[in-house]
Image (tube, rainbow, N blue to C red):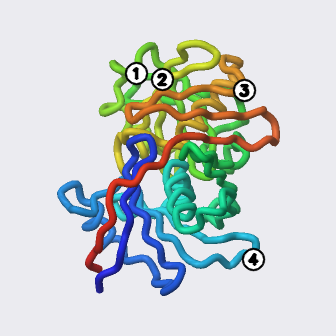
Amino acid sequence: MRIPYTKMHGTGNVILVVDQRQKNLPPPDSETIRRLGDVDAETHFDQMMWVSAPNEDTCIASYRVFNADGSEVEQCGNGVRCVAKFLAAGSPERRDFRLQSPAGVIIANVFPDGQVAVCMGTPVFEPARIPFVCGEMADSYTLTVDNEVFSICAVSMGNPHCVLIVPDVATARVAELGPKIERHERFPEFVNVGFMRVRDRDNIDLRVFERGVGETAACGTGACAAVASGQRLGLLSDEVCVSLPGGEVVVSWRGGDAAAWLKGNAELLNDGMMDL
């Protein structure tokens, strides 16, 4: 079976958008997703956004998120921006979208300049809801990896994140520590790992080792997690520019129960057909 797809990127994060709102086909099995996501495949992606008809009357579409290794995850900020931009291309008179996701209803706004802002929900710091194994909730924790102790922050943006502050992202031990922290026993559902350098209160540098993917050019939920963590530590302002290997995004969060907003680009790469 051959079905169409649209390949896009958000800040360098390669997204495969598969629109099944009409036929409503179920997503393929994990082995097929791994084959489609392989780095040598024409369909190669970091995340696949499988778009379907919504069950929620107020939403225009629903989506599920799959990593290149075939695993399904709860959220992808860069992927949501690409889905919203894709939907806007088919409805040029519409600029505001409500989308049904595994993490709840998401609001996305597409601006005339092509930038997309997505409401990513409220950062969650309660350990049981991340999930993260610890005694009591705190702004930061210690995590032991190979007998080395690190200070970390733990937060959920609909998916679990661990954030480390580093002096320089260029020399951060992403390849070494990323996979070890990703599958650390204190993160029972595994975790995305962010390496953040705070330049000043309004700017950070960030690299992210994504759960089920490895290091990527960008991670939208990782950017939100890093900014929320930095704000909890009193290091960052309410609006922060996040510099990732793939480009820049802006994260806004007013603290407390307020939702975090993620703004950045979403660009078309190519359309194609894939064989299931």
Separation of residues labelled 2 and 1 (CA atoms):
7 Å
Residue under pointer 3: 238
Sequence-first tag of 3 and 2: 2
30 left or right of 231 in image: left
When asked about the image quadrant of residue 258, the answer is top right
Disc 3 crowd rating (10 Å Cα; few below 14, some 14-19, many 20+) is some
Mark 4: secondary structure: loop
Mark 2: secondary structure: strand
Q: x, y (%) of residue 228?
A: 66, 32
- The correct choice, above or below, for 79 with respect to 214 in the image is below
Residue under pointer 1: 169
Sequence-first tag of 3 and 1: 1
Marks 2,1: beta carbons within 8 A:
yes
> Residue type at mark 1?
Val
* Mark 3 or 1: the one toward you: 3
Sequence-first tag of 4 and 2: 4
Mark 1: secondary structure: helix
Q: Tell me the tag on residue 205.
A: 2
Q: x, y (%) of residue 168?
A: 41, 16
> Residue type at mark 3?
Asp
Q: In which quadrant will I find the C terminus?
A: bottom left
Q: In which quadrant will I find the N terminus?
A: bottom left
* Mark 2 or 1: the one toward you: 2
Name the residue located 49 percent from the left edge and 19 percent from the top edge.
197
Separation of residues labelled 3 and 2 (CA atoms):
16 Å
Separation of residues labelled 3 and 1 (CA atoms):
22 Å
- The correct choice, above or below, for 211 with respect to 255 in the image is below
Residue under pointer 4: 57
Sequence-first tag of 1 and 4: 4
Q: Nearer the viewer, residue 159 or 207?
A: 207
Mark 3: secondary structure: loop
